[in-house]
């Protein structure tokens, strides 16, 4: 009898401890933090850069007082500009590269990719050529985009060849080793690459030349090595352009005037932008803090509505942007002045 009584007491104690453990576990679970509406109380500053024979098209930075902007040009001493928190400047040194893209990992680790298969790096002191993928002149490689998640995992993408016979190209710097993956069956110039942290897949945006001089947009999913598949190809319709941006570690895709998520192989609409000025490009910090590229400036979606934040009297072309916690930089080509504007916003 005493054995049965002991077993009953033991089981009861075990059950009570299990309930206590369950209660402790449940009480320690917290609900996901609600995403706050994006703020709009910015103070705006506009810097003007009119550079003979050069337009800046790519921008990146490690923090608000370390931002770089580059572009190809006729004068090789005026293609790389830096913002130190106060002003934009160029060091006037001529370098044998026509840069198309820039990517800053840190103040002492900045990369540029350009024409003729060239890749350069800035170590905090000086720029130097790191590697050149050599090709015959008619099949030169141009690197139009760069992205990396660490100093030892960086991708450079673009194309090689003449427009009528392009080959898509992706170079990878991986733990001090270089690898070039060529995709001769793809006739796209890759102009953007990034990684979705949740799916751990890479995505690329490519442009293919059309016979009439227009472009076909393509979106691609990539495993980081040799396997790539196309997940979208635009038609000739004007509303079927494509783009993507990473927002809070997740890739969002723009198809025409709709911003989408990509779930289980399908594009799921997230935000339809009906504004007539919308130029089908966007940048964002969170789902409730998205900047929209407009024909006359920058608008903002705060999770509730869309409003212009900065408006220019002339039509402008926003080509790149960098978003920090409290500051934003937009790189703009302004045809009315024949140069660049850098539109800077700082939260109050």
Image: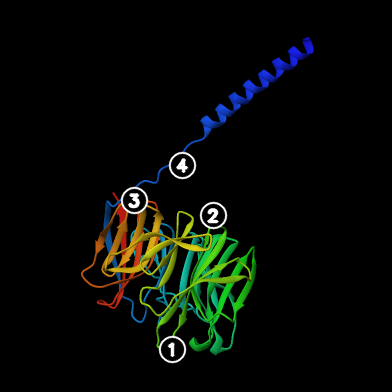
Place of residue 58 in the rendered image (x, y in percent of width and height, measured from the top left): 42, 70
Say whether marks 2 and 1 touch (CB < 8 Å). no
Mark earlier in primary sequence (4, 2): 4
Secondary structure state at the residue bearing disc 4: loop
Per the model, the C-alpha gap separating discs 2 and 1 is 38 Å
**Residue that numbered label 1 is attached to:** 211
Q: Nearer the viewer, mark 2 or mark 3?
A: 2
N-terminal of the pair, mark 2 or mark 3, is 3
State the CA–CA distance, disc 3 to disc 4: 18 Å
| Residue labelled with disc 4 | 32
Task: State the scheme by which the image is colored.
Answer: rainbow
149, above or below 31, in the image = below
Which disc number belongs to residue 38?
3
Give the position of the N terminus as an image quadrant. top right
Asked whether disc 3 touches disc 1, contact meaning CB atoms under 8 Å apart, the reply is no
- Select label 3 or label 1 by which is in front: 1
Estimate the x, y position of residue 278 in percent, counting from the top left: 30, 67
Instruction: Looking at this view, name the residue that lies furthest to the top.
Output: 2
Q: Alpha-carbon neighbours of circle 3 within 10 Å: few (<14), some, or many (≥20)? A: some
* Mark toward the viewer: 3 or 4: 4
- Does the CB distance between marks 2 and 3 fall below 8 Å? no
* Residue neighbourhood size for the residue with mark 1, other residues' Cα within 10 Å, grouped as few (<14), some (14–19), many (≥20): few
Residue at (37, 67) in percent of width and height: 281
* Location of residue 75 (image quadrant): bottom left
Seen from this angle, which residue lies furthest left?
313
**Real-space Cα distance between discs 3 and 1?**
42 Å
Q: Which residue is mark 2?
A: 198
């Amino acid at each position: 009898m005493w054995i049965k009584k002991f077993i009953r007491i033991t089981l009861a104690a075990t059950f009570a401890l299990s309930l206590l453990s369950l209660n402790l576990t449940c009480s320690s679970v917290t609900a996901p933090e609600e995403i706050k509406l994006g703020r709009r109380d910015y103070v705006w500053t506009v810097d003007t850069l009119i550079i003979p024979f050069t337009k800046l098209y790519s921008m990146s930075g490690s923090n608000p007082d370390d931002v770089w902007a580059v572009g190809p040009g006729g004068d090789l001493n005026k293609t790389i500009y830096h913002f130190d928190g106060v002003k934009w400047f160029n060091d006037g040194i001529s370098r044998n590269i026509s840069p198309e893209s820039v990517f800053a990992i840190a103040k002492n680790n900045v990369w540029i990719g350009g024409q003729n298969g060239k890749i350069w790096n800035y170590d905090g002191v000086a720029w130097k050529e790191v590697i050149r993928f050599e090709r015959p002149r008619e099949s030169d490689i141009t690197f139009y985009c760069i992205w990396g998640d660490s100093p030892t995992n960086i991708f450079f993408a673009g194309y090689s060849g003449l427009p009528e016979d392009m080959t898509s190209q992706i170079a990878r710097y991986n733990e001090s080793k270089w690898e070039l993956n060529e995709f001769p069956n793809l006739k796209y110039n890759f102009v953007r690459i990034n990684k979705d942290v949740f799916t751990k897949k890479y995505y690329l945006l490519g442009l293919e030349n059309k016979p009439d001089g227009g472009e076909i947009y393509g979106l691609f999913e990539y495993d980081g090595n040799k396997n790539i598949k196309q997940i979208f190809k635009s038609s000739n319709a004007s509303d079927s352009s494509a783009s993507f941006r990473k927002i809070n570690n997740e890739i969002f895709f723009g198809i025409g005037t709709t911003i989408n998520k990509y779930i289980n192989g399908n594009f799921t609409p997230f935000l339809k932008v009906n504004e007539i000025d919308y130029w089908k490009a966007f940048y964002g910090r969170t789902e409730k803090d998205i900047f929209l590229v407009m024909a006359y400036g920058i608008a903002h979606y705060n999770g509730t509505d869309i409003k212009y934040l900065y408006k220019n009297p002339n039509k402008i072309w926003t080509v790149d942007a960098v978003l920090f916690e409290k500051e934003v930089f937009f790189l703009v080509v302004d045809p009315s002045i024949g140069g660049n504007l850098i539109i800077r916003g700082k939260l109050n």
